[in-house]
Structures are given as C-alpha cells and as structure tokens.
Image (cartoon, coloured by chain):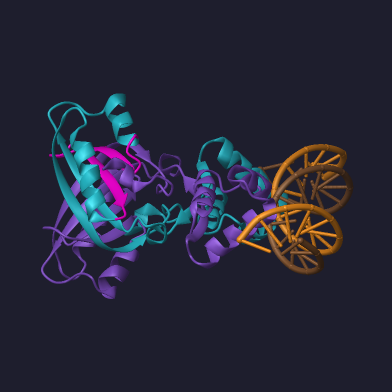
Chain colours: A purple, B cyan, C brown, D orange
Amino acid sequence: MDDTDRALLAELQADATLPYSALGKAVGLSAGSAHERVRKLRERGVIRRTTVDVDPAAVDRGVLAFVMLQSNAWMGDPPTRDALAAIPEIQEAHIVAGSSSLLVKIRTPTTEQLQAVLRRVFDIDGVTGTETIVVLETFFERPLNVTDDPDRAR
Amino acid sequence: MDDTDRALLAELQADATLPYSALGKAVGLSAGSAHERVRKLRERGVIRRTTVDVDPAAVDRGVLAFVMLQSNAWMGDPPTRDALAAIPEIQEAHIVAGSSSLLVKIRTPTTEQLQAVLRRVFDIDGVTGTETIVVLETFFERPLNVTDDPDRAR
DNA sequence: GATGAAAGACTTTCTTC
DNA sequence: GAAGAAAGTCTTTCATC
C-alpha cells in the first residue's frame, strides 16, 4: 500500500470505468502494471467492491434520517445486527459510544414510511428508545479520502 | 424508471464489473438493451458515478465519528458548505432538523486526528458547539435499497 | 424500445526484463 | 514488480424489427 496504490484508489473512486491504460497514465504506470496492482487491491480486500452511486431522489428515496437507538442491554451481538439488516430501508448501522448504543441511517420515500420503519426498529429486542434526526438537505456525500496526509491538519 | 431499471441498478450496485451480457441475462434483456438502459440511467443522472468501495481500515482511516454541530446562525449557505468540503476527513455533511443544525461524518486514522478535525470545524464561522458520537463497530454499510416495495412495511 | 451482429476497444495473460 | 505484446472478451454502434 504505497502512494501509487492510493493514487489508483483515488482514480477508481472518481471513475471506476476508466480503462487500465488511462489509469496507468494517471499514476505513471503501464496498463499492465496498473491492472496487476488493482487486481491485488481487490484480492486483499482493500477494494471491497465496484459499484454504482445511485441518486436516492431518482429512485424515490428522498427522505433521509439518522436515528440513535437507546437500549436496556448490550446490542453488539449478531441477533441485533440481523434484525437491523432485515430492514431494507436501513443503509448503515453502527455501534457507538455515548448515551445511545446504536446509530442507524435510514432512507425512505416519505416521512410516513420513515415512521413505519421506526415502528419496526422499536420492536427489536432490547430497544428502549429512539431519537430521530431528519436531514433537510445533503451538502455532500463523497468517497472516503485515501490520499491526503492526515498530519497536515495539525 | 420501471422494475427492469431498478433490477439493473441493483445488479450494478452489487457488482458494476459485470459484462452487459450477464447484466442482460439477470434482468431478462439482451446485452444491447441492457447497455442502452444503463446508458440512459447514467445520462439522466440516476447513476451518479461508477466507483469502488474502499475498506477504511486498509487505508488507515479506522476511526469513524458522527458530529452534530450547533450554530448561532443559518448554516445552509455555500460558504459553510465550502468550509466543510475543504476538510478532507469529512465524508458527508447534512443540514438537519432538530437541536443541531448540521451533521457530519468524519473518518480519521486516530482519535488524535479526529480531535484535530474537530478543532478545524470549530473554527468555521457560526459554529458554537459540537457533539461527537464515536463509532465502536460498524455492523454494515450497504448501497441504497432500490428494489423493495416500501409499502411492504406498513 | 429491443435484438443480433460487426467493428473497435479493452481486459487478461504471458514472456521478458 | 514493471513492461510490452498477443489472444480473447467486452463495449459500442448500427441496421432491423
């Protein structure tokens, strides 16, 4: 995982349809070498998948909310995970530190359907409360930054 | 945007490296027709980009936090947006309803660097407070669900 | 809007360094 | 690990329905 690998990842995050010839040119490698490095990045699991970014509004998922869940027991086990994963509107679920125990990201067509999802969440074993933050506008959502030196900011 | 388009989007979300022949087979179309539909989905902006999903831990971004920002003024304008976008560790930024005005998602290598980012955030005009939720473990992060009927849940 | 086929471009593999 | 080239596959376009 050197700077060339990071540069390849950044290029692929921006446009994974680039041919290896262009990818190689962008990072100063031949097409064959670029291909070999990308193959290894996939093999090692650094690249988890190649995917498309879909506009939520265009598929009628215009409502976005973050919900913090309170519980009366440890929620870090597979049953909780599976119960959350079974709700397709939940896009992310995280165990967190702080007064909540879980944080989930939910997308629905309407606030009415958000309410329906919250009802399902409340039915999960151990859940004792929810706090919902509704998103009014998304400034941006972008790929993980892989290139900048994090020490820069200090 | 019919069920076939949604099926194509679901296939591409799962694996955007599939050849059009396989894509067509999965949804009951010829390779040519699948290609034509995907082309239009890109043209209309339904598909915003083709990208790779990178494992944060593999590129030394193992610390994830959600931060709620309080402010003493309306933060929904471009200057605020640009100030947040200039911080590469911020992966998402949303204007929200509720007691906070903004919610941001931050990834850093260490909690020390999370602290450095919070300091930068505090320096943005109008920011009067932050509340940080540190993620201990991510259950899952998955593509937006595009196929399920949202009425199912009610 | 879908199909099947042709032309061109790209991926993948292999040999060499 | 990188480069260059060959073989095979895929993308893209087009004529047709």
- The boundaries of the magenta stretch are B86-109
Q: Quadrant of the C terminus of chain B?
A: bottom left
Task: Report if residue B99 lies within the magenta region.
Answer: yes
Q: What is the x, y in percent for residue C17?
A: 76, 61
Give the residue at x 43% y 47%: A147
Task: Locate residue B118, reporting x and y percent.
Answer: 21, 43
Q: In the image, residue A11 lies at what x, y percent?
A: 54, 45
At 20% from the left edge and 48% from the top edge, which residue is drawn? B115
Q: Residue at x 64, y 50 (%)?
A: A29
Residue B37 seen: no
| Up/down of A57 relative to B31, above or below | above
**Nearer to us in this view, A134 or B126:** B126
- Residue at 29%, 69% in the rendered image: A81
Instruction: Kindly tell me whether residue A47 is visible in this rendering.
Output: yes
- Work out whether B77 lies above or below B46: above
Would residue B134 appear left or right of A25 to someone viewing this image? left
Residue A12 vertical position relative to residue C11 in the rendered view, above or below:
above
B30, A116: nearer the viewer: B30
Q: Which picture quadrant has residue B142?
A: bottom left
Q: Is residue B2 left or right of residue B77?
A: right
Side (left or right) of A63 relative to A2 = left
Q: Verify whether residue A18 appears in magenta.
A: no
